[in-house]
Amino acid sequence: MDKLIIEGGVRLKGSVRISGSKNAALPILAATILTDEVCVIRNVPNLRDVHLMLRILRTLGAQAEFKKGVVTACSKRLKSYTAPYNLVSKMRASFCVLGPLLARFNKAKVSLPGGCIIGVRPVDLHIKGLKRLNADITVSGGYVHARSDELKGGHIYLGGEFGSSVLATANVLMAAVRAKGTTIIENAACEPEVVDLANFLNKMGAEIEGAGTPAIEIKGVKALKGVEHKVIPDRIEAGTFMTAGAITGGNIVITGIIHKHLSALIDKLEEIGVILERTDSSLRIKAGRNLKPANITTLPYPGFPTDMQAQFMSLLSIIPGVSVITEKIYPDRFMHVAELNRMGAHIQKEGPHAIIAGVKYLSGAPVMASDLRASAALVVAALAAGGKTEVSRVYHIDRGYENIEKKLEALGAKILRIKEN
């Protein structure tokens, strides 16, 4: 098991290129199940989660190879409709094979998912949506069992207690493209990752309109073809480097991004007082001298992303004054609070709120990552902390950040990865 050793207090300078989006790549890889033909997916990040999805595809009987950011996948000889517990339990996004397996075989058996411990994340919306497509679904023995004589288009409302669901939208979308007739998904997730999946499916021959809005219309088709596709850049990785540049008082250029995917983050950084300069596909981050506290509420896209809540908490922890973060997507997603407080932050959790009293500086300390974005928050905090920080359990960060220590080192950070005993 690895850990990161970070010597803080270094201003980051230079340029960093953002990798392909993990959250876009995973459902797109699952969607290759829908065709017998070869699909070539480019700009795929080299991550633990990606390789786990490839293992799931191979377990199902697909051929799937990864080489230098390119996945070549073919599901012609798919032999199984069962996604096993030992794989699906490790990553929540792997549950999105349910929809394409059901569309391919008219039956599917998929383990209930695992992943980061950030609060209760039920699969009820996935089940609700697929039932509206004429699927019979039961849950037993830790597996979701789905079956249908024929998938049929339907009118589906995917609203949940905390808003829309990206993965549920993806699962229903992938099943609906092969269903008979027309499907309408209302309160669909609007995230760029859903749009990227819809673009991929449309290239394959699907007929999808409205992706990126709360209402998606899908006209079912009989067959899909193999295609080439390039995955969009990772907006959460970009946001993480934006906070890293700001918290260190640095001057960095982030390249290979799509600005409109980052609008909520850009707006909040400018509110705080960070200086941003835009070009066509890059963004320069320069921290202002007198940063101000802010209040943040996480919301579905295009609102402030829950996946950036922890990293912004690190930044707000050293800004004078009181800031409040309200988590409306996963109200229990505050595992990082205790670890940030170990580094000298003054953060108090009150239900779905975190009240942050800014301190002058953080101090290096041994800390432990609890989930993917919490680990990123600890790295961001460590970059600004005085002294040395040891971040354990960084296998979490390897799930979502490609070569993060090498990218930070190229910006001047003093960071080292070592093996733990």
Image (cartoon, rainbow, N blue to C red):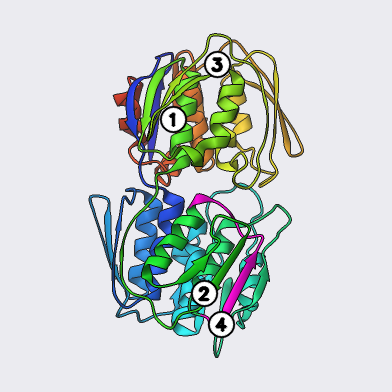
Q: Which residue is mark 4?
A: 181
Mark 3, mark 2: which one is toward the viewer?
Answer: 2
Amino acid tagged 2 = Ala
Q: Foreground: 200 or 23?
A: 200
* Whether residue 379 is situated above or below residue 95 in the rendered picture: above
Label 4 neighbour load within 10 Å: few <14, some 14-19, many 20+: some
Q: Secondary structure at mark 1?
A: helix
Q: Which residues are magenta?
A: 179-192
- Which residue is disc 2 drawn over? 175
Tell me which numbered mark, 2 or 1, is placed earlier along the sequence.
2
Determine which of the numbered discs, if any, sits on residue 201 in the image: none
Tell which circle, 4 or 2, labels the residue nearer the N-terminal end.
2
| Residue 213 coordinates in the image, percent (x, y) | 59, 56
Task: Confirm whether the magenta stretch covers residue 314.
Answer: no
Label 3 belongs to which residue? 362
Choose the circle earlier in sequence order: 4 or 1. 4
| Picture layout, residue 384 above or below residue 50 | above
The tag on residue 241 is: 1
Q: In the image, is residue 187 above or below residue 11?
A: below
At label 3, which amino acid type do we have? Answer: Leu
Label 1 packing within 10 angstroms: few (<14), some (14-19), many (20+): many
Q: Is residue 191 magenta?
A: yes
For the residues labelled 3 and 1, say whether their Cβ atoms are less than 8 Å apart.
no
> At x 34% / y 62%, what residue is drawn?
54
> Label 4 sits on what residue type?
Gly
Q: Nearer the viewer, mark 4 or mark 3?
A: 4
Would you say 146 lies left or right of 25 here? right
Q: Residue at x 74, y 39 (%)?
A: 352
